Amino acid sequence: KEPLVRVSNLKMHFPIYGGLLRRRTGEVKAVDGISFDIFEGETLGLVGESGCGKSTVGRSVLRLYEVTGGSVTIDGRDIAHAAPEELRKMRTQMQMIFQDPQASLNPRMKVSEIIGEPLREHHAGSAAERRERVLELMDQVGLNRDFANRYPHEFSGGQRQRIGIARALALNPKFIVCDEPIAALDVSIQAQVVNLLEELQERLGLTYLFISHDLSMVRHIADRVAVMYLGRIAELAPRDDIYAEPLHPYTKALLSAVPEPDPSVEEKVERIILAGDVPSPSNPPKGCNFCTRCPSVMDICKRDEPEFREVQPGRFVACHLFNQTT
Ligand code: SF4
Ligand code: MG
């Protein structure tokens, strides 16, 4: 089966300027050669600590940045290299839901204008049809139609995120990048928004890239999970596999800190505390980028970068421990 989204060797390096002359002194390798597929109707969770590059991946996939290298195809078309006119068309297929609904909504626009903005930008239908579509979208995300003329500040955080979701759905996208969509919300509201996203996925056949540092939430929503560390993917696997038996030493450490969801089950996993800090993405370690902190580090790890490869059906790992596995 062909994936809906295919990311191949994606690189996103940002220049660093320094000194009196503001010369280019280096670069931050925010995303440094990552590859993954997303299949139609699935949710791929992308997890990792803050600063690992996961948000940059989300933005690069939608080409909100010009990427440094690699390709991103959506429905077989390369968005990373699409000409402006084609890009504009492709943009209707893919949308983003942002972390902070407050910051992503224009405070001077009415809710109906915010949700209808993509429709106007893409000249979708008549003014009357657009008005009707906005009301329909408000229904879909559980916002009262009577609130169409209100302003964002009149809504709660959860409602504002519903406005952001309605706007993202306006042009009937196939693919949505959800970048920490619930991180800014009260815990009591988080489940409601996640349930809404799941319900919409089911109803509209949406495909999600769900970016989060919240491993419990990702366990709930994702079909497959990719774990990022310092600009690269350490491990990618079906959700149940990765939570039951993480393979990469970094995934093991990360998951050992997640509480067991069922309180009646005794915690079996011993918490793994990693030594040291995450190295700077402007100066990542040679070889395996996890070698400075890995409890299982070997000589080869400091020399050769491990290949990201399929070590069991559907399970991808970048680690020398698995190089002999077939
Ligand atoms: Fe650890 Fe080596 Fe595997 Fe990297 S390649 S995760 S340093 S064992
Ligand atoms: Mg799902």
Image (cartoon, rainbow, N blue to C red):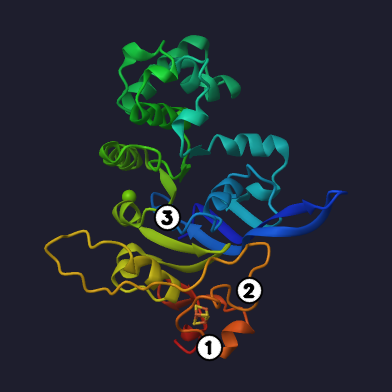
Residue located 41% across and 28% down the image: 166
Q: Is mark 1 within 8 Å of ligand 1?
A: yes
Within-10-Å neighbours for mark 3: few <14, some 14–19, many 20+: many
Residue located 31% across and 62% down the image: 258
User: Mark 3 vs mark 1: which is more N-terminal?
Assistant: 3
- Which secondary structure, mark 3? strand
**x and y percentages locating residue 172 in the rendered image:** 46, 32
The residue under label 3 is 44
Q: Amino acid at mark 3?
A: Leu
Residue 171 shows up from this direction: no
**x and y percentages locating residue 143 in the rendered image:** 32, 22
Assess whether mark 1 and mark 3 are in contact (beta carbons under 8 angstroms). Answer: no
Placement of the C terminus among the 4 image quadrants: bottom left
Q: Residue 106 or 116: which is nearer the viewer?
A: 106
**x and y percentages locating residue 98 in the rendered image:** 48, 38
The residue under label 1 is 298
Point out the frontmost of discs 3 and 1.
Answer: 1
